[in-house]
């Protein structure tokens, strides 16, 4: 018992050595543990600053810095240094080490190397910061003037700290990249989902329009047959009636009504067929409006001002004049109707390059330049529900029921391999744009 107590008091050299090694390892592991910093998702710069503090607990460098590899340029940049006012001095020292190949040497060795400073007065420790995958940075430390070397144990602890710091920085960078990729993926999913919903709406609209078009076509054919019979009967009666008889008076009053009904039937058929070409021709925008302007002026009231601003009058389009005229007059009629008293209708045109065509429209169009013809009015405008139903046949917010005309416009423009876009707000007027392919 006395012998055991004496052994404990005097200490076993082997035990003391093992205990010292154990304590040193515990100390190294504690100093090299950056798990908390990684868990808090702090920045690489913050880990670099903490690394310098821990290293200075082992070796009292006069000044030291950690340089990290720039992810974009691959250059070494000082991100943390102590003291802060020594940064310019440390940058000059680093430049000297790079120019003389000492940094490249440290990177090859993947361990700490000691060499002379730029002025040759002091020793400098260079130690690469590396993970298994790549180089992450470099530690540079300036020894005090009275110190020329570092013991092996201290250097090993510094190596452990720098290796773990490098792994921590790499984890942060990879985590940031993963978060960014995840966010990009989520944004892409949202965009694709929104796009799919838009396509679904367009598909439902197209299906509804096809069904309505089929109905409109059937009604138009039946109505047209009845009108032909009626016209034939009136012509037959006219052959036997006296010119100045009351019968002829009634017949002459009936003919304009039949013509209007025939025009209505033509619009129905134009919508049902999508505006089938009857006689297409290449003409300039200027000629198109020269042909149509007299009818436009007759279609609007005297209290409504008309302005025409054609950006490039010589630009040509391939159109069915009758169909396009019908579309233009339908738009003008709706614009005039939307203006309660005094107002303005403005017609303008411009070239519209393919790059400006909305992505969702490109799959339905032929690549090339387009002509944009815009019709603007300062009338009552339309709410969201009216905009959604604008191109339905027979739909109208007015008693006159001009909704059919806008349905015909949609069919005509699509048949011309173009598209139509409408912007409107209640109380702020309406802007309708027709996009037609520019003629070669």
Image (tube, rainbow, N blue to C red):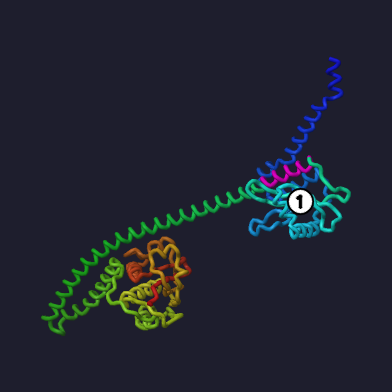
Question: Is 180 within the magenta?
Answer: no
Residue 426 place in picture, x, y as percent: 46, 66
Q: Is residue 378 left or right of residue 414?
A: right
Please state, as top left, top right, bottom left or bottom right, where the N terminus lies in the image.
top right
Residue 178 place in picture, x, y as percent: 58, 49
Q: Residue furthest bottom?
A: 244
Q: Residue furthest right?
A: 146
Query: On the image, numbered disc 1 is attached to which residue?
Result: 126
Identified at 47% across, 66% down, the residue is 425
- Up-down: is 301 above or below 14? below
Identified at 89% across, 49% down, the residue is 146
For the residue pair 335 and 29, the one nearer the viewer reads as 29
Quadrant hosting residue 211:
bottom left
Residue 204 place in picture, x, y as percent: 36, 57
Question: Is 158 within the magenta?
Answer: yes
For the residue pair 336 and 351, the one nearer the viewer reads as 351
For the residue pair 219 and 58, the one nearer the viewer reads as 58
For the residue pair 288 and 85, the one nearer the viewer reads as 85
Q: Is residue 317 left or right of residue 82?
A: left
Q: Residues within 10 Å of mark 1 (few under 14, many from 20)?
A: many
Q: Main secondary structure of the magenta part?
A: helix
Please state, as top left, top right, bottom left or bottom right, where the C terminus lies in the image.
bottom left
Q: Which residues are magenta?
A: 153-168
Residue 435 place in picture, x, y as percent: 40, 72
Q: Residue furthest left?
A: 240
């Amino acid at each position: 018992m006395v012998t055991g107590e004496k052994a404990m008091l005097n200490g076993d050299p082997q035990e003391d050595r093992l205990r010292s090694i154990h304590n040193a390892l515990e100390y190294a592991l504690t100093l090299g543990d950056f798990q908390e910093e990684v868990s808090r998702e702090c920045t690489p710069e913050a880990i670099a600053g903490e690394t310098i503090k821990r290293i200075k607990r082992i070796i009292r460098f006069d000044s030291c810095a950690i340089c990290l590899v720039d992810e974009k340029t691959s250059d070494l940049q000082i991100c943390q240094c102590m003291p802060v006012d020594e940064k310019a001095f440390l940058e000059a020292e680093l430049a000297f080490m790079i120019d003389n190949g000492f940094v490249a040497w440290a990177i090859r060795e993947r361990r700490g190397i000691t060499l002379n400073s730029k002025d040759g007065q002091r020793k400098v420790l260079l130690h690469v910061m590396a993970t298994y995958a790549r180089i992450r940075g470099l530690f540079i430390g300036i020894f005090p003037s009275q110190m020329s070397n570092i013991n092996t144990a201290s250097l090993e602890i510094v190596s452990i700290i720098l290796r773990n710091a490098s792994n921590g920085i790499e984890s942060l960078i990879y985590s940031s990249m993963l978060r960014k990729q995840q966010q990009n993926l989520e944004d892409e999913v949202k965009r694709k989902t929104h796009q799919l919903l838009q396509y679904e709406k367009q598909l439902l609209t197209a299906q509804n329009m096809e069904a309505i078009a089929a109905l409109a076509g059937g009604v138009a054919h039946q109505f047209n047959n009845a009108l032909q019979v009626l016209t034939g009967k009136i012509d037959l009666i006219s052959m036997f009636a006296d010119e100045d008889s009351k019968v002829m008076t009634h017949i002459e009053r009936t003919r304009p009504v039949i013509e209007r009904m025939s025009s209505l039937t033509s619009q129905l058929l134009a919508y049902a067929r999508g505006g089938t070409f009857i006689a297409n021709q290449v003409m300039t925008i200027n000629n198109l409006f020269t042909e149509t302007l007299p009818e436009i002026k007759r279609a609007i009231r005297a209290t409504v001002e008309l302005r025409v601003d054609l950006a490039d009058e010589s630009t040509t389009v391939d159109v069915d004049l009758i169909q396009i005229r019908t579309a233009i007059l339908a738009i003008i009629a709706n614009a005039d109707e939307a203006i309660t008293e005094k107002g303005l209708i403005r017609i303008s045109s411009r070239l519209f390059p393919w790059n400006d065509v909305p992505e969702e429209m490109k799959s339905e169009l032929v690549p090339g330049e387009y002509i944009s013809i815009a019709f603007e009015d300062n009338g009552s405008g339309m709410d969201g529900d009216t905009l959604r139903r604008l191109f339905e046949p027979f739909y109208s917010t007015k008693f006159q029921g001009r909704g059919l005309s806008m349905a015909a416009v949609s069919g005509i423009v699509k048949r011309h391999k173009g598209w139509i876009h409408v912007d409107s707000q209640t109380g702020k007027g309406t802007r309708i744009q027709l996009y037609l392919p520019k003629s070669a």
